[in-house]
Amino acid sequence: MSRQFMKGNDAIVVGALQAGCRAYYGYPITPASEIAHAAAMHFPALGGTFIQAESEIAAINMVYGTAGMGIRTMTASSSPGFSLKQEGMSYIAGAELPCVVVNVVRGGPGLGNIAPEQADYFQVTKGGGHGNYRLITFAPNCAQEMCDLTVLAFDLADKYRTPACLMADGFTGQMMEPVEVPLAKEVPYDHTSWAVAGTPETSKNLISSIYLESNDLERHNLKLDAKYKEITANEVRYEEYLCDDAELIIVAFGIVSRIVYSTIDEARAAGKKIGLIRPITLWPYPSGIISQHAERDVQFLSVELSTGQMVEDVRLAVNGRAPVHFYGRCGGNVPSGDELLAEYDRILEGGRS
Amino acid sequence: MKIVEKSLSFYKEFERKSGPHKETTHYCPGCGHGNVHKMIAECMDDLGIRDRTVFVSPVGCSVFGYYYFDCGNIQAAHGRAPAVATGIKRANPDSIVISYQGDGDLAAIGTAETIHTANRGENITVFFVNNAIYGMTGGQMAPTTMIGQKTTTTPRGRMETVHGNPIRMAEIIATLPAASYVERVAIGNSKHIMKARKAIRKALENQVANKGYSFVEILSTCPTGWKMDGPDSRDWLIEEMTKVFPLGVLKDDADEREGDWYRPVKGFEPAKRDTYLGADIPDEVIEKVGLKQDLMCKFAGFGGQGILTLGLFWAQVGMRNGLHTSWIPSYGPEMRGGTANCSVNISEKRIGSPLVEKPNALVVMNQPSLELFEPDVIDGGTIIIDTSIVEGRPDTARLNAVLIPATEIADEVGTPKVANVVLLGALAAASGAFTIEQVEKTLRATIKKKNLIDMNMTALKRGWDHVKNGG
Amino acid sequence: MTETVQKDAPFIEITGELCKGCKLCIDVCPKSVIAISEKLNGSSYHPAYYTGADCTGCALCFYACPEPAAIRVVKP
């Protein structure tokens, strides 16, 4: 391990390489292009593959091909490009292939702008493509996590044979911070039971998501569902800060969680009992810890760079037992610390719901 | 004795096929797909490539290619077979990859993938089965449907002015320099079929010899979609289709390319990656610097003055002295008034927001930045101004001002470009958080052009001394 | 439904149950030694059959037939 100062977007590529990702396929888009730049520089230098595909659609299907061979592979994009990848991601989930897809979210809908938002939450966590599938989704909030969660995403994608996603934002992508670069690992995984690797031992295997008979497709869906339940039981990750005595628990992820974190000590110094729950996995969602806190006299506030998406999952977890508030900015605006502190006051004084 | 029979590259029984008939295909009577399948399977037998072949089944009637071919099978989304094939071939260049596609798949929804895969010269083999209609979805118009041909979506016949013309994919592919071999064949009669066998063999031999991208368009039939019986459909193919889609070799320079298109995976060893990324370099032992307060700095100026680099230097001074640091450039709507700016936090504690909303130190290199950011600086904070450029002066009743003609000093040192380093020296001195040796060490390690180190050290010292000696 | 043939002469075997009655083999046979059966097979097709003599073993019927296993050509 060594400590290096790097951009979040670059840290993703470093994490991918150290996780044993051997092929990167992508299409340029702001603010995710640095990931492609770094991949173009590093993958070929190490004997891996980089292709600038003709489209996001082609890129995700190249990922499908390489993932089908049992080789770690990835693509990265930003919101409009991520939308284009949805068909391929549904196929990847349906065919149970492991891969990592990064979405450095920008402002939408439509062309929107290149500034940070978190408004792809629904698309990412609820299955942006067709059919019954889920996407393991990580929400890094610093350069170190951009690296480490990429490594973890590859590991979990392999473990469950399912696509995993990093949902970042323009800030976490552009920000530079010290990163402990992890040592590279061999991929300790035997793919021969399912991959089609162009080898004699895998020549009987089939990668497919087609099940013509209704009973077969239902069985396949139930199998996927069982897998998603297992992931939900085992892979929830979150960070909790000063929640035990909190009267108001803020729920925030990504860059917003950093801003909220900065406000908490200030609020506490003024005698206000504020805490933070930061989902690190957006799917599976940390409903358990939110539900646990909802048992006592507490209020929740979801702060997002959207008009209110994750707040729905907070409400589901709270299930009517406590007030759930929402505060959001969008279009590339981020809430200032002062803005948030004023919002906390309004809620604690009962002025808003 | 010579026996011509079912190829070994077909499964003995088609167990993946639903229903009771495990030895026949799912194709309609007289359908050309079966003929093409047989020719491919025969060739896989002859070339001994079955074990390492990956057959990419697209969407269309041949979506069930994996019922039949006893090799690795990957089913692809509609039109995406060449992209999937690219991902397969790049992952294992020793595999033999067959992208088997119909006219809707290859020439309509997957046109982009088709053309760009050919344009990259992927070392794969594409078999394009053109039967001028959509079979599986119910006899709709294909991009290759003939003018006048009636389909379920051209009930009055295809018209040029409404639907465009049948598209000649082989001709289009043949214009691409990276494509090695492009031929159009047919299965209209026995002569056609014998030629088609040769073309299919050549296309696969090319791949085995790493001669690059091969494309064989095979004019085929859809008796059901065309509403004809087997022999009539073959006659119609010969009489109508070959007029619009002439048979023959459109391009063949494969023999000049032997081996050129092999893209081996050369090592990906963990140790190699560690060395390349510097993951195996042990960290220097750092004596952690204590801070009296968090350093929340904003750096602002015109783009090109090195203001963002100054922020980077400063952040790394923090990192190399054992502190938490973050650097973030102005981004999105924050970028305003023609200024470039960045926020740098240095703290003993974990850093919350990387955005510095209320700096306790501000370094400005142009007038608009002073006007824009001075009000944000907290009472008692420090403003460092390059007086060579900035005319305004801050409110000294509220703030500590460090006035330094940084650009002029830099010019004396050697070039105005090191004005940012002069300011780094000034900031380091004014902050009182680091010794000049600590800053020098970081700068030395951070500057990439080693011949410029001496000049930078001088610039740093001049900035430092300017503050320490009271200007 | 294998036909028996003269010793040492080329012949074809048509497995009637695998035939879909498309007649392409009949169309290409240079010796016109393949015909369509009046009986239906298990899949309700009138299958082709070898009339029993004069096959040259040219195998054109094999390649004209879309089915992988319906026709087998033997040339002693």
Image (cartoon, coloured by chain):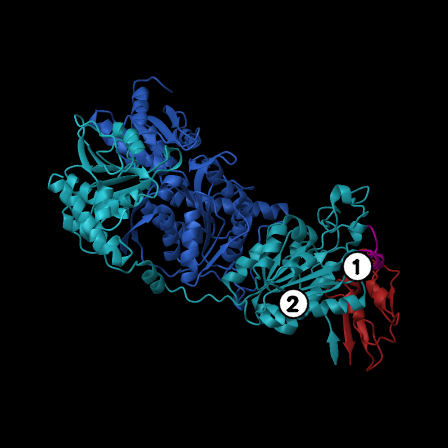
Q: Nearer the viewer, residue B205 or B355?
A: B355
Q: Residue furthest left?
A: B469
The amino acid on which the numbered mark 1 sits, given as a three-letter code, is Thr
Image colour assigned to chain B: cyan
Find residue B203 and name its label. 2
Q: Nearer the viewer, residue A169 or B25?
A: A169
Q: Position of residue B196 (x, y in %)?
A: 73, 66
Placement of the N terminus of chain B among the 4 image quadrants: bottom right
Viewed as shown, does residue A272 lie left or right of B31? Answer: left
Viewed as shown, does residue B129 lie left or right of B255? Answer: right
Find residue A99 and name its label. none
Q: What residue is drawn where x is 70% and y is 67%?
A: B39
Q: Position of residue B158 (x, y in %)?
A: 78, 45
The amino acid on which the numbered mark 2 sits, given as a three-letter code, is Ala
Q: Which chain is red?
A: C
Q: What residue is drawn where x is 28% and y is 60%?
A: B280
Q: Taking the image as drawn, is residue B315 in sight? A: no
The magenta region covers B227-243
Q: Secondary structure at mark 1?
A: helix
Residue B339 sits above or below residue B245 on the image: above
Mark 1 lies on residue: B242
Question: Local crowd at mark 2 within 10 Å, few (<14), some, or many (≥20)?
Answer: many
**Chain for disc number 2:** B
Q: Taking the image as drawn, is residue A351 in sight? A: yes
Q: Position of residue B248 (x, y in %)?
A: 74, 65
Image colour assigned to chain A: blue
